[in-house]
Amino acid sequence: GSHMWVQRVKEKEAELKEAEKELHEKFDRLKKLHQDEKKKLEDKKKSLDDEVNAFKQR
């Protein structure tokens, strides 16, 4: 009996570890996506600033 119980606990632990790994991977993907979006926004803002400055200098 107790052997089966240990086996089941080990399986549950393995499942948890797997789920945790997936969560971390998902989080890393989201973080990367966020950084890409932020960079795009900053590039847009920069080109807008450049346009404004060019306009002011005229």
Image (cartoon, grey):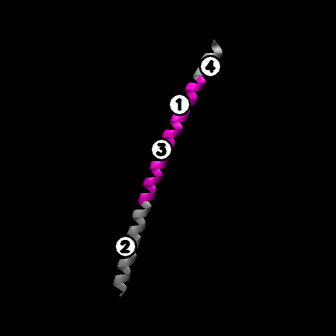
Image: 47 above or below 3: above
Q: To which residue does mark 1 refer?
A: 43
Region rendered in magenta: 21-49
Residue 53's label in the rendered image is: 4
Q: Is residue 41 magenta?
A: yes
**Element at badge 3?**
helix
Residue 33's label in the rendered image is: 3
Marks 1 and 4 in Cβ contact (< 8 Å): no
| Lower position in the chain sequence, tag 1 or tag 4 | 1
Q: Where is residue 38 in the image (x, y as percent from the top left)?
A: 53, 38
**Element at badge 4?**
helix
Judge from the rendering whether residue 46 lies leftward or rightward of residue 32; answer left or right: right
Q: Position of residue 45 (x, y in %)?
A: 58, 30
**Element at badge 1?**
helix
Front position among marks 4 and 2: 4
Q: Where is residue 24 in the image (x, y as percent from the top left)?
A: 45, 56
| Lower position in the chain sequence, tag 4 or tag 2 | 2
Q: Does the magenta stretch include residue 22?
A: yes
| Lower position in the chain sequence, tag 2 or tag 1 | 2
Marks 1 and 3 in Cβ contact (< 8 Å): no
Q: How far apart are marks 3 and 2 (CA)?
A: 33 Å
Which residue is drawn at the image coordinates 35% and 88% (left, top)?
Answer: 1
Image: 35 above or below 11: above
Going by the numbered disc 2, the residue's amino acid type is Glu
Marks 2 and 1 in Cβ contact (< 8 Å): no
| Lower position in the chain sequence, tag 3 or tag 2 | 2
Which residue is drawn at the image coordinates 49% and 47% (left, top)?
Answer: 31
Q: To which residue does mark 2 refer?
A: 11
Q: How far apart are marks 4 and 2 (CA)?
A: 63 Å
